[in-house]
């Protein structure tokens, strides 16, 4: 008898079908992984179970939790189920907590809402819950506020809220996607421990096969509102009956084909680059503090080379890229592009800037929504001494769009008509149009689904072969960096702690931090090998 | 033409045109002469001879409204235009130099203007330059400047955090150019909405100034002064207050509708869904 069973759950919102006869089951002490790409309906499945659906939603099918038919419950009864029988953890720990209330209050609130315990008893339960998630009383008293905690610690508070009443079922919707890899590994270990301790069931929703495979007992793979394959984790990977499962697995471990290229002379070189920020004064008379985001960084990118820069959020990767692009002046050191040196504090001349371009992470914020693609893509023409005339312009737009796998006619469309992956292609077209020698890819594939990510990586590898362009590939994702770079720099707290050939660094990390990163990165092939699946 | 498919644009445009037309016609013709007093027929309710009735001096209210439209609409429109023309560039400049000395100077100057009650500013200006419609426009315009500057700065700041402004800088564009090319079109919808709200406030501000004797001078009628003068008569002859009030409400409504329609029309993301 399973703890939760979902039978033939179908959902439509304002007549648009979202879920189609989804059936799932979770047993006590069991972890069910739901995997799918954006829009596959995995989050909507979770919200259907909790009956937290948007207006205009119509739900059919059966959802049974411990002999209770949830679909038949009134909203009032459902409120008791949420938080008490089912706990939920969301993706974004930064917004899941109320910033003006202490963590103790927020955890205790769950208890006060669902039981008639006193405030004192509720706070005692909150204390216990916070201890269980590893936030101990000596360092994390109940009176702490969310802003005093890091992202991983906040996610622990959210988990404490979800498990405070020891629910029978815990639903986690991408709980580690917004976190760094080392934090992710800790949170997953925590969740696994809680499931074992309480014997509760857990539904873990993710897009990342690597994360879920080592954790889940059973898997359900979703696509376009349907469960296309389900079963015990090991079985799913041995059988791989559905072509989509195969595709997903291949995409997760995708390594683009790259031709062996002659690496040329040094293209970009930074020497002891320093980038400092002045922090706001804490008191009126005190001198403002200085924060050094980039600390004496020396790195080189040679012609035709793909160089990776890895590190966790806040380590200074993006600050470094902005200094290299001449968007922000450095406070020390030099930047040189093929021998042309720029001393710290000097503006970057246009002729140099022209030779570098950038692709950003967010495919939604990277474009002015009011311009057509042709205008967006030709923005860097501003850097040219001679602006191309109308005909040449149109021709180069068409070339750039076809080079990234889009159609010429897309030039007349607006950006909102494209999907995330297509937008990232347009961003690459924009970076390519002035034929730069170096493109900085700042987490350029991090926001994309695995199958789209594989396509974009292929595209990048192909473009670097065809145009001989060098990449500085900035990412927190070691798997991606490994797939596409020749050499890698590992950055921590503004400094480069290790550098070398990508394979060598990842296979034989020398610095402790690199070792920690490599160990924390979930790797599907390794997990599967441990399970005995080839 | 896409414009003809937007009901709010058509409705708003029609209402606004109606009042502009009334103001225009008043230059050549009004039903009665508004400078002629006829105490014998004062405070008459609407009738066939006087469609909207007469006021406390026996003047025809319809004619007064037509004449008043000239002053009220002109004062409010020009004042809003003035406030926008001064405030938006200041706000954009402050946002482009966020945290710098230019930002500080502009925003603190704004605070100073906002710290003075609007009326006090107006009184000071009219004390120096003398009362009259033009000085009322300047006074109201000065009062609107920080409103638009703050709005433009706030909206622009959130856009400056988006990557497309960074992409434009990578393309070598200056902050001025990015402000004009990328920021301004994206905050235009907010400015249009604020503009229509400010227009309503402008009419009311003109009314307030006129009431105190700092606006248009008698015998030039304005909606605000008509409303102010009718204040004590609402119990015995409500129509004297209702019609100028209604004129203000309907004009503001018309402009608001037109603003909404324009906003949707100018946004490429809404175009397809609206057809």
Image (spheres, rainbow, N blue to C red):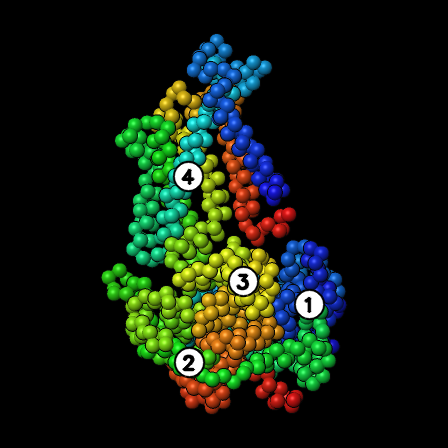
Q: Nearer the viewer, residue A178 or A439?
A: A439
Label 3's element? helix
Q: Which residue is mark 4?
A: B81
Total numbered circles: 4
Q: CA distance from mark 1 to mark 3?
A: 37 Å
Q: Which residue is mark 1?
A: A224
Residue B145 vertical placement versus A157 (above, below): above
Q: Residue at x 59, y 50 (%)?
A: B271
Q: Of the residues tagged 4 and 2, which is closer to the observer?
A: 2
Q: Residue at x 61, y 89 (%)?
A: A529
N-terminal of the pair, mark 2 or mark 1, is 1
Q: CA distance from mark 2 to mark 1?
A: 43 Å
10 Å neighbourhood of mark 3: few (<14), some, or many (≥20)? few
Q: CA distance from mark 1 to mark 4?
A: 51 Å
Residue B36 vertical placement versus A259 (above, below): above
Q: CA distance from mark 3 to mark 2?
A: 30 Å
- Regarding residue A364, the answer to whether it shows in the image is no
Question: Which quadrant is the N terminus of chain B positioned in?
Answer: top right
Determine whether label 3 and label 2 are within 8 Å by CB: no
Residue A302: give its label. Answer: 2
Q: Position of residue B184 (x, y in %)?
A: 44, 50
Q: Position of residue A430 (x, y in %)?
A: 50, 65
């Amino acid at each position: 008898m399973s703890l939760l069973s979902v039978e033939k759950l179908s959902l439509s919102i304002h007549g648009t079908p979202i879920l189609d006869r989804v059936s799932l089951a979770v047993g006590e002490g069991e972890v069910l992984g739901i995997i799918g790409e954006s829009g596959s309906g995995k989050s909507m499945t979770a919200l259907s179970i909790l009956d937290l659906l948007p207006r205009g939603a119509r739900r059919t099918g059966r959802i049974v939790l411990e002999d209770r038919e949830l679909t038949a419950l009134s909203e009032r009864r459902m409120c008791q189920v949420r938080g008490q029988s089912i706990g939920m953890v969301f993706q974004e720990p930064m917004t899941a907590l109320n910033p003006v209330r202490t963590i103790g209050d927020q955890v205790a609130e769950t208890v006060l809402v669902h039981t008639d315990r006193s405030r004192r008893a509720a706070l005692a339960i909150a204390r216990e819950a916070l201890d269980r998630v590893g936030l101990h009383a000596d360092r994390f008293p109940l009176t702490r506020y969310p802003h005093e905690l890091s992202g991983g610690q906040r996610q622990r508070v959210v988990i404490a809220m979800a498990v405070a009443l020891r629910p029978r079922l815990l639903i986690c919707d991408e709980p580690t996607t917004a976190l760094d890899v080392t934090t992710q590994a800790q949170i997953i270990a925590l969740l696994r421990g809680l499931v074992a301790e309480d014997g509760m069931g857990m539904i873990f929703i993710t897009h990342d096969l690597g994360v879920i495979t080592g954790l889940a007992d059973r898997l359900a793979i979703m696509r376009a509102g349907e469960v296309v394959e389900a079963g015990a984790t090991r079985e799913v990977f041995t059988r791989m009956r559905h072509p989509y499962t195969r595709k997903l697995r291949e995409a997760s471990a995708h390594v683009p084909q790259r031709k062996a290229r002659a690496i040329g002379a040094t293209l970009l070189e930074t020497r002891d680059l320093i980038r400092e920020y002045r922090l706001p004064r804490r008191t009126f008379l005190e001198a403002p503090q200085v924060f050094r985001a980039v600390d004496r960084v020396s790195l080189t990118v040679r012609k035709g080379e793909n160089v990776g820069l890895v590190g966790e959020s806040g380590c200074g990767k993006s600050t470094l890229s902005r200094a290299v692009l001449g968007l922000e002046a450095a406070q020390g050191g030099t930047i040189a592009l093929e021998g042309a040196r720029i001393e710290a504090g000097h503006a970057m001349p246009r002729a140099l800037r022209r030779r570098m371009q950038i692709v950003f992470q967010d495919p939604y914020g990277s474009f002015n929504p009011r311009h057509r693609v042709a205008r967006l893509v030709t923005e860097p023409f501003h850097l040219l001494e001679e602006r191309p005339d109308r005909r040449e312009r149109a021709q180069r737009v068409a070339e750039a769009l076809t080079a990234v796998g889009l159609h010429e006619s897309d030039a007349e469309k607006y950006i909102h008509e494209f999907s995330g992956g297509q937008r990232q292609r347009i961003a690459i077209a924009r970076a390519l149009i002035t034929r730069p020698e170096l493109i900085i890819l700042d987490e350029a594939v991090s926001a994309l689904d695995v199958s789209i990510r594989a396509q974009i990586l292929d595209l990048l590898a192909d473009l670097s072969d065809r145009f001989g362009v060098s990449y500085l590939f900035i990412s927190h994702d070691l798997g991606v960096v490994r797939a596409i770079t020749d050499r890698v720099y590992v950055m921590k707290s503004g400094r480069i702690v290790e550098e070398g050939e990508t394979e060598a660094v990842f296979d034989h990390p020398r610095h402790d931090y690199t070792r920690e990163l490599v160990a924390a990165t979930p790797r599907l092939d390794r997990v599967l090998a441990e399970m005995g699946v080839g | 033409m896409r414009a003809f498919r937007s009901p709010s644009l058509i409705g708003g445009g029609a209402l606004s045109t109606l009042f502009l037309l009334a103001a225009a016609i008043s230059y050549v013709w009004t039903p009665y002469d508004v400078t002629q007093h006829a105490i014998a027929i004062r405070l008459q309710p609407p009738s066939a001879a006087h469609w909207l009735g007469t006021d406390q001096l026996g003047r025809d209210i319809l004619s007064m409204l037509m004449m008043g439209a000239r002053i009220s609409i002109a004062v409010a429109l020009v004042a809003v235009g003035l406030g926008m023309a001064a405030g938006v560039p200041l706000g954009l400049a402050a946002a482009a130099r966020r945290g710098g000395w230019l930002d500080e100077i502009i925003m603190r100057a704004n605070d100073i203007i906002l710290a003075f009650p609007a009326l006090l500013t107006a009184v000071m200006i009219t004390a120096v330059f003398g009362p009259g419609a033009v000085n009322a426009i300047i006074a109201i315009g000065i009062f609107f400047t920080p409103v638009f500057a703050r709005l433009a700065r706030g909206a622009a700041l959130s856009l400056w955090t988006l990557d497309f402004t960074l992409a434009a800088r990578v393309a070598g564009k200056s902050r001025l150019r990015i402000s004009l090319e990328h920021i301004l079109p994206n905050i235009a919808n907010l400015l249009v909405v604020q503009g229509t709200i400010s227009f309503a406030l402008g009419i009311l501000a003109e009314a307030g100034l006129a009431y105190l004797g700092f606006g248009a001078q008698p015998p030039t009628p304005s909606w605000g002064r008509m409303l102010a003068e009718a204040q004590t008569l609402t119990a015995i002859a409500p129509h004297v207050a209702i019609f100028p009030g209604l004129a203000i409400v309907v004009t503001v409504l018309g402009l608001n509708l037109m603003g909404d329609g324009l906003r949707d029309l100018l946004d490429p993301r809404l175009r397809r869904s609206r057809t």
